[in-house]
Image (spheres, coloured by chain):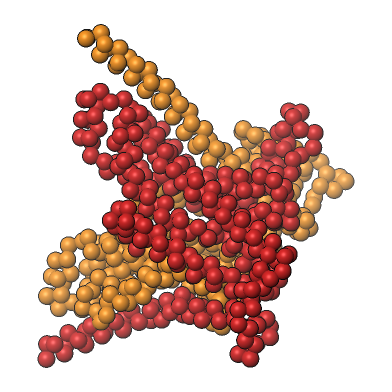
Chain colours: A red, B orange
Amino acid sequence: MINNKKKLRSYREFLYILPFLILVAVFSYYPLYGWIYAFFDYRPPRPFSFEDFQGLKWFKYLVDNPVRLNQTLSVIRNTFVMSGLAILTSWLPMVFAIFLNEIKCMPFRKAVQTITTLPNFVSWVLVFSVAYNLFSSSGMVNSLLMKMGVLERPVLFLQSSEHVWGSMWLWSTWKSLGWSAIMYIAAISGIDEELFEAARVDGATRMQLIWHITIPSILPTYMVLLMLSISNFLSNGMEQYFVFQNAFNKESIQVLDLYVYNLAMGSGSYSVATALSMLKSVISVILLCVANKLSKLIRGESFM
Amino acid sequence: MKEKSKKVRMKRSAGDYAISVTTYVVFALFALVCAYPFYYIFINTISANDLSERGKILFWPQAVHFSNYSSVVKIPGLLQAAKISVGRTLIGTVLTVLLAGFLGYMFTRETMWKRKFWYRFIILTMYFNAGIIPWYITMRNLHLINNFWAYVLPTLVSPFNIILVKTYVESTPRELQDAAEIDGAGTMRIFISVVLPIIKPILATVAIFTAVGQWNSFQDTLLLMSKTELHTLQFVLYRYINQASSLASLLTSNAGSEAIQQALATAQTATSVRMTVTIIVVTPILLVYPFFQRFFVKGIMIGAVKG
């Protein structure tokens, strides 16, 4: 009798959440079914038909002639460069946090922290608007430089294909540096104060304290975040590159996520785009598992 | 011996001093780089437009006027976009927060049938993504193209939020729920009168993250909304930047042949509209962020520990 009642309750509790499980199934799991488009010839508005089976045609299509192969390779190159730059400079937030922690004037520290985390919360469209107002041909930088006589004609910062990688890296660092440092700031505040005291009694300098106590204490945090960024190697997101892209910088700015979008919405190649994004998802999941295993090996703890 | 130790201390403080000065300068510069662009745009929106057009406004506003803000409202479509942006932020945030609270709590109920399995079922969705085409076609099949609910429904159940709330509920004393249970309260009753009041702090965190996400969202409009009535402020701003020519045609130019200095100072230009809309779009974030910073920080910390 009591057992029955318990069982009823356990089912009823399940029923409460069932509608939301269905929501998840519909919006997150059901789209996976769309991966079959990668194996068929699907060109809306023509309805999808199982007659049009193409096998691996669209996967081969990405590399089967020199022009397309070049295109694919340049997209891969851009993706690798952007992710590579991000990983190579992933220690910056850690350094930011360490030195911010050295600042003893609290109001200044609080102000710096608040101001530098703000850009993280504005959208890429707004960042682009800022970039446009500052760096377009009639923007602040150009008009200032021309007024000072440094330039005769405006420099087309945003329409140039040069330095695209560098400027994209700068914008994303500008946007995220302060915010990424927060994790390390919290990790530093968790370090046992007695360690520092003991070292100070032994005559350690400030740099020695940082080098021998602070850095080793927050290195595990750094490793976890590094692993996560390795698992996101292929996913740069498309918003940043989408808003900054134009006819002049397309060759250097097109990363995988943006290329998939341009393929699909620009040229209507649904099947190729699906094939590419499916490939990307599968590799990403593999990378995630590898990173997770690595983290287990290094820290004895996985992050998933 | 004594002298030596003094020397060491001296050296240390000289090094310390150099580090301190450099740190202060570098951080002050970086903070300036983060803040100045927004300040620059703001002072240009309230300065005379002809001065601003010639790049004269760099450090402080000149010939202050606010007509940019009053006239930008009259641009067709902008008010509607503002309504959509506010609407999706309000509705999306309220529903997402309620649901995160409810599901976060439900997944702490050990009595639930196959609780662990369903929890994993939701969390797993953080780690894969079908891609934009399958997603787009799903949305089309659900008739969510050009439909306001496409802004709200897909992100309603967020694994990250559920993790945050579940962790928080688990950290509160279980005895409160047990006591209510002995008093005969059911699952829902416990949620509403016991759990909900004590998880308010974490719900504030979830709310603030969701609201910022909703306000900033751009990609869903780009992919799903061809109807201009459903465009958000972010999207309209993007259009204004990229289609300066079409923007200019929207403006009723009053800088004709008989234009006087006053008219020039307040006449709308593509630049003034762009900057004014930028400030309008960024203001909610600037207002909200400093006051709620601690909630953001709390969110990222719990998420980091558990995620």
* Residue A78 makes an appearance in the image: yes
A162 w.r.t. A45: above or below: above
A145 sits left or right of A296 in the view: right
Residue in front for this viewpoint, A162 or A54: A54
* Residue B201 makes an appearance in the image: no
Counting labels gives 0
Residue located farthest toward the right when viewing the structure as drawn: B257
B222 sits left or right of A119 in the view: right
What residue is rendered at 32% in x and 53% in y?
Answer: A298
A16 sits left or right of B2 in the view: right
Residue A19, x across and y down, in percent: 38, 81
Residue in front for this viewpoint, B255 or B181: B181
Residue A215, x across and y down, in percent: 34, 39
B258 w.r.t. B126: above or below: above
The N terminus of chain A lies in quadrant: bottom left
Residue B252, x across and y down, in percent: 78, 55
What residue is rendered at 26% in x and 41% in y?
Answer: A191
What residue is rendered at 74% in x and 40% in y?
Answer: A155
Residue A161, x across and y down, in percent: 71, 49
What residue is rendered at 34% in x and 63% in y?
Answer: A304
Hey, which quadrant is residue A56 in on the image? bottom right
Hey, which quadrant is residue B248 in on the image? bottom right
